[in-house]
Amino acid sequence: MRRLFPAPQDPSAAVDREWELTEIADAYAYPAEHADGGWLRANMVSSLDGAAHHGGRSKPLSGAADMRIFGVLRALADVVVVGAETVREEGYRPARQRAEFTGRRRAAGQTTVPAIAVVSASLHLDFSLPLFTEPAVPTLVVTGAKAPAHGLAAARTAGVEVIVAGDESGADPVRLKRALAERGHTRLLTEGGPRLLGQLAAAGVVDELCLATSPRYTVGTAPRLMSGPEIPEPRDLALTDLLEDSGFLFGRYRRG
Ligand SMILES: NC(=O)c1ccc[n+]([C@@H]2O[C@H](COP(=O)([O-])OP(=O)(O)OC[C@H]3O[C@@H](n4cnc5c(N)ncnc54)[C@H](OP(=O)(O)O)[C@@H]3O)[C@@H](O)[C@H]2O)c1
């Protein structure tokens, strides 16, 4: 892996080499202002032609460096916010405890692993899956006040904490972020998918986008990273970092 931007002061730092996990973690540290209402980072991988998945999975777009960064970003987060369709499509499991990050997380006052927060309006979720039955830190479900009663009952029977963060069946992005931050989850990470990220981005609550551009194209009709109704005006993010590994570009963009 090598850094392309900002150009390293020391030219040897631009040399392509395997980075330690701690170096990646330092490069992706949450900014200090995360404490002020929470910092929501999105981490997504895209094909060259803008596809967010291939055959319903993001793995065909990914690679070794992307998976390493994916794991580090999880290890830095208090909570991973994910759309229900991604949970259903990708067979989401609880976050894995990693010895390399135990000390770092303890020092940062974090639980051993991040909690997973599944965002769902239908509550059409299989609460018997390990995601809900075996996590080291309880998995949360975020929904709206008009979510189906049978889904709420199923979640509560399974001992899953349900956070109501909206007046309709869905969660309101601003309330979702605030509700998680109020529970101490101020270092937030969303792993999409595109429909959830589209809503979070349209509502203006995404503080940072970590975008892995895969050196592959797929053609087809897969969605872009953010899908949903077009916003009235394009919004700018500022590029803060650009890394490269094996042809993958890892951009980091934040709100102006
Ligand atoms: N390229 C990447 O980095 C990446 C990352 C993640 C996923 N993916 C891919 O994306 C695909 C899935 O993405 P997707 O866009 O179809 O779905 P998604 O965003 O993962 O999930 C959509 C679902 O999330 C729930 N949801 C979204 N917004 C909500 C809100 N405001 N309130 C309550 N619930 C809300 C709804 O669940 P209910 O239906 O339960 O109401 C909705 O159907 C998969 O193929 C996956 O592989 C790619």
Image: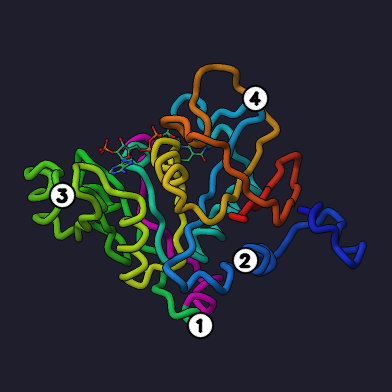
Task: List the residue tagged with mark 2.
Answer: 25
Which mark lies nearer to you, 3 or 4?
3
Q: Are marks 3 and 2 in contact (CB under 8 Å)?
A: no
Q: Secondary structure at mark 4?
A: loop
The amino acid marked with disc number 4 is Tyr
Which mark lies nearer to you, 1 or 3?
3
Total numbered labels: 4
The amino acid marked with disc number 1 is Ala
* Image location (x, y in percent) of residue 255: 59, 55
Q: Earlier in the sequence, mark 1 or mark 3?
A: 1
Residue at 40%, 62% (x, y): give it: 79
Q: Are marks 1 and 3 in contact (CB under 8 Å)?
A: no
Q: Quadrant of the C terminus?
A: bottom right
Q: Residues within 10 Å of mark 4 (few under 14, many from 20)?
A: some
| Numbered mark located on residue 97 in the image | none
Q: Secondary structure at mark 1?
A: helix
Residue labelled 4 has its Cβ within 8 Å of some atom of ligand 1? no
Q: Residues within 10 Å of mark 1 (few under 14, many from 20)?
A: few
Task: List the residue tagged with mark 3.
Answer: 145
Residue at 54%, 44% (x, y): give it: 44
The amino acid marked with disc number 3 is Ala
Residue 136 magenta-drawn?
A: no
Q: Which residues are magenta?
A: 88-105
The amino acid marked with disc number 2 is Ala
The Cα–Cα distance between marks 4 and 2, rounded to whole angstroms, is 29 Å
Q: Earlier in the sequence, mark 3 or mark 2?
A: 2
Task: List the residue tagged with mark 4.
Answer: 217
Kindly give the residue lying farthest to the top in the view shown.
Answer: 220
Task: List the residue tagged with mark 1.
Answer: 107
